[in-house]
Each structure stands twice: as structure tokens, then as C-alpha cells.
Image: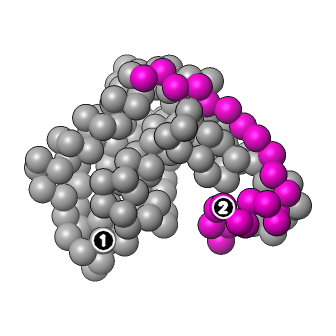
Amino acid sequence: MAKEYDPRMHSAEHILNQTMVRMFDRGRSFSAHVEKRKSRCDYHFDRDLTPPEREELERRVNDVVAADLPVREEFLTRAEAERSFNLSRVPDEAGETIRIIRIGDYDACPCRGEHVSHSGEIGGVRIISTSFEGGVLRIRFRVRE
């Protein structure tokens, strides 16, 4: 059963993750807490983001949102998915068919949650704050109403 995330927030999390990968080449979040009101993603990192980095991250995320990219699902066998994706967070009970969510050509990753049909439906993302402790960068964000 898929988690009951807010589709806008969950789709924003995917875009934030890919933007972090592109900006810092450190990988996707290793932990996330996604809720309708506000969410957070945790990354293995060596410091907090600077204010200009936070602004650039938010700008890039919102550029992807504004591009109104299509959000599509596809299904791969587990063997096919393992060739392109890290499946360490995909539970064994997911079976032999893995659902991949694609946001245009910007992002693709295994996922069971609900999503918007186009990135423009997110409306916009605001980074509320960032913090760093014990090798973990935490980014708190919300979608704009």
C-alpha cells in the first residue's frame, strides 16, 4: 500500500532531491518526512548550506516546478530497475515489479507514493530552513498555497 503523502509535497520532494544531486553530487536524501503542511529531507553532508546556496537551491527547484514537466509512472522488473536505480530503500514486499516515477527528463526514481500529473501543479516551493549536525544536512520546506 502506498504511503498517503500529499501529491504536491511528495512531487516537490523528488524535485528537491534531484536538484541536490545536480548541485552537490552527494546523492538523494537518506531520510525524509513528507507531510502536507511542511516536510524535511536529510542528506549526508559536511556542512550547512550558505544563504546564497539555499536561495539558488530554491530557485532551481522552482524553475523545474514552473517548467510544468509531465509526471509519469513506468514499471520495470526488479532486475531492470537494479541496473539504473538504488533499490536499497525499496522493500522486498514490493515484489518483482518496481514503479518508477519520472518528472520529465529531470528526475526518475523508484516510488510508491501519490504524485501530481505535471510539476506546475506543485505551485512553488519555499525552503523554510536548513541545519547541520553530526554529518547530516536537514532541509525543511513547504509548498506554496
* Residue that protrudes farthest toward the bottom in the picture: 134
* Viewer-nearest residue: 130 or 98: 98
Instruction: Tell me the element at label 1.
Output: loop
In the image: residue 51, left or right of residue 105: left
Q: Image point 37% across, 72% down: which residue?
A: 44
Magenta stretch? Answer: 67-89
Kindly identify the amino acid type of the residue bearing the numbered disc 1.
Answer: Phe
Dot 1 or dot 2, earlier in sequence: 1
Kindly identify the amino acid type of the residue bearing the numbered disc 2.
Answer: Ser
The C terminus, quarter of image:
top left
Q: Is residue 87 magenta?
A: yes
* Viewer-nearest residue: 128 or 19: 19
In the image: residue 93, left or right of residue 144: right
Instruction: Tell me the element at label 2.
Output: helix
Can you tell which mark lies on residue 9?
none
- Give coordinates of residue 96: x percent, y percent: 88, 61
In three-dimensional space, the C-alpha distance between marks 1 and 2, rounded to whole angstroms, equals 23 Å
The residue tagged 2 is: 84
The residue tagged 1 is: 45
Colour pattern: one colour
- Give coordinates of residue 13: x percent, y percent: 47, 44
